[in-house]
Image: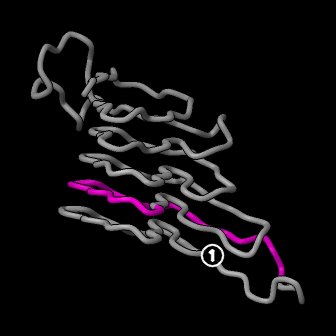
Amino acid sequence: GDQIWIASGTYFESINLKPSLSLYGGFIGGETSLNQRNLSINSTTIDGSTANTSVILGATGAVLDGLRVTGGISTEGGGGLRCENARMALRNCRIEDNYTTSLDSAAYGGGILCISSELTLLDSVVAGNRTELLAEPTKHIPVISAFGGGICALQSNLHLEGCTVRGNLTN
């Protein structure tokens, strides 16, 4: 598939991934191979705070590597990453400080929401994400719930290796 190499910096946008597209962060701009990038010095952030939606919409065969995904605000679930009917991978990523809210009966996946998907996370961090339900129970909606402040997987397969999931909240 195609690759896009992204220079260090903060990019205010949301991304709808195409199948088999790989996004790599951590570059200065003069590299000629992936192993020349330095992720600890050259941070690449995709910030969805101005988009008012999920920061990343997943796709089959897509890869995110070396990116910080933050600022996502979603009313449909998956503030940082929403993966639906897809198979994709995240490596060396930070999914941080994203938010999902709902006025309906349920809110899902502040950081990551997977629906009927397969997601592999390697050497990544999911932290400081939040899911909040703003609805009040009524006779028409007697049960309300919020699920997965960090990660919510519905009919999905998750594989986590070398990852840290911490400080995520569900309210």
Look at the picture and state if 92 lies above or below 31.
below
Residue located 50% across and 52% down the image:
82
- Compared with 122, 58 (above or below) is above
Q: Secondary structure at mark 1?
A: strand
Q: Could you say which is closer to the camera, residue 130 or residue 53?
A: 53
Identified at 57% across, 38% down, the residue is 48
Quadrant that contains the N terminus:
top left
**What residue do we see at 33% from left, 59% from top?**
118
Q: Residue furthest top?
A: 30
Quadrant, the C terminus: bottom right
Q: Quadrant of residue 35?
A: top left
Note whether 128 is above or below 155 in the view shown.
above
Type of the residue with mark 1:
Ala
Residue 154, position in %: x, y?
47, 70
Task: Please state the extent of the stretch shown in magenta in the rendering.
Answer: 115-136
Whether residue 126 is in magenta: the answer is yes
x then y, percent, for residue 5: 29, 22
Closer-to-camera residue (72/154): 154
Q: Position of residue 58 (x, y in %)?
A: 43, 44
Q: How many numbered discs, if any?
A: 1
Percent position (x, y) of residue 64?
32, 40
132 within the magenta span? yes
Quick one: which residue is furthest to the right in this view?
139
Label 1 packing within 10 angstroms: few (<14), some (14-19), many (20+): many
Which residue corresponds to mark 1? 146
Which residue is pictured at 25% across the width and 65% down the height? Answer: 159
Along the horizontal axis of the image, is 18 left or right of 91? Answer: right
